[in-house]
Amino acid sequence: MPLSATDEIVAPAYTRTSGVGAFNVVQIEHAEAIVAGAESAGLPVILQISENTARYHGSLAPIGLASLALARAADVPVAVHLDHAESADLVREAVDLGFTSVMFDASTLPYARNVEATREITDHCHRAGVWVEAELGEVGGKDGAHAPGVRTDPDEAAAFVTATAVDALAVAVGSSHAMLTRDAVLDFGLITRLRSAVGVPLVLHGSSGVADDDLAKAVTAGMTKVNISTHLNRTFTRVVRDHLDAHPEAADPRKYLGPARDAVAAEVARLLRLLAVG
């Protein structure tokens, strides 16, 4: 299988024990900010578009094609990734549009069905040279592998990767999605055991809830791809709110979206440098 842009970004980080930031795009200003931050840091980055965001825009194509255009014009390596897709049809659409990686999330299915569905997606994507991330979680868990208290078993993770042939695995080590506070308690020993057991890069979801020092420790322990969304959304929204509070007469959205975009770009650059600990 030929290397995808995501392989070219993640594989070197995996071998160096350094991390790669993967940041979620909600609207075009997010994509512009993430690319600008990566260029400022001189480091590669992954733009992520979730199934929920595709639904918000009415379909995947508008925000997906805009993100792909920004990625292709960037001065640093940028991959465009479909995040948390439960729909096989959406995965196929992403592949057709030119995404270089996808995350297929069948973690709420029983283990055997998760393996079967994920392997079907992996086979399809690999024929197109597209990288596949999957998630191994509890049966019926509301947040999949990242429901509070859930942890990934290294032996089961190794068996799952072998059975599905995925290129990366999202694992549960103490973080949780959509956290508004940065006080998640990660199990660094488990990360190390997972890294030893699983022969593909590990992905940390829910990283907005992890403090800076612990993000760096997680990468040193064995995490490679680090997903961050809520933290950047809070930064974006805070700047917009501050501007509108100070300028209640504002009508031109560029006047408040522009500063929010700049603030996110600066935070992306800072986080990318933090993750590049190897």
Image (cartoon, grey):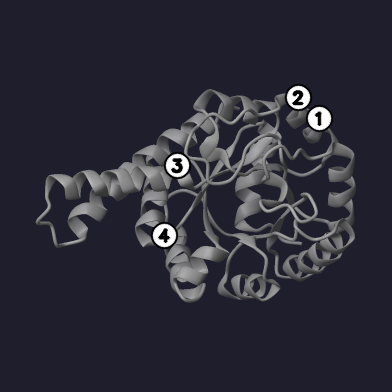
| Quarter of image, res 74 | bottom left
Residue occupied by mark 3: 231
Residue on which disc 1 sits: 193
The span from disc 4 to disc 1 (Cα, nearest Å) is 39 Å
Provide the secondary structure element on which disc 3 rests.
helix
Q: Amino acid at mark 4?
A: Ala
Mark 3 to mark 4 CA distance (whole Å): 26 Å
* Residue 265 spot, x, y in % from top left: 36, 44
Relative to the observer, which residue lies in front, 251 or 99?
Answer: 251
Q: Are marks 1 and 2 in contact (CB under 8 Å)?
A: yes
Q: Is residue 125 above or below residue 162?
A: below
Residue identifier under label 4 = 73
The residue under the point 67% across, 35% down is 223
Amino acid under disc 2: Gly
N-term mark: 4 or 2: 4
Q: Nearer the viewer, residue 88 or 127?
A: 88
Could you say which disc has been placed on residue 189 in the image?
2
Task: Determine whether 78 is above or below 181 in the image.
Answer: below
The earlier-in-sequence mark between 3 and 1 is: 1
* Residue depicted at 41% across the width and 51% down the height: 35
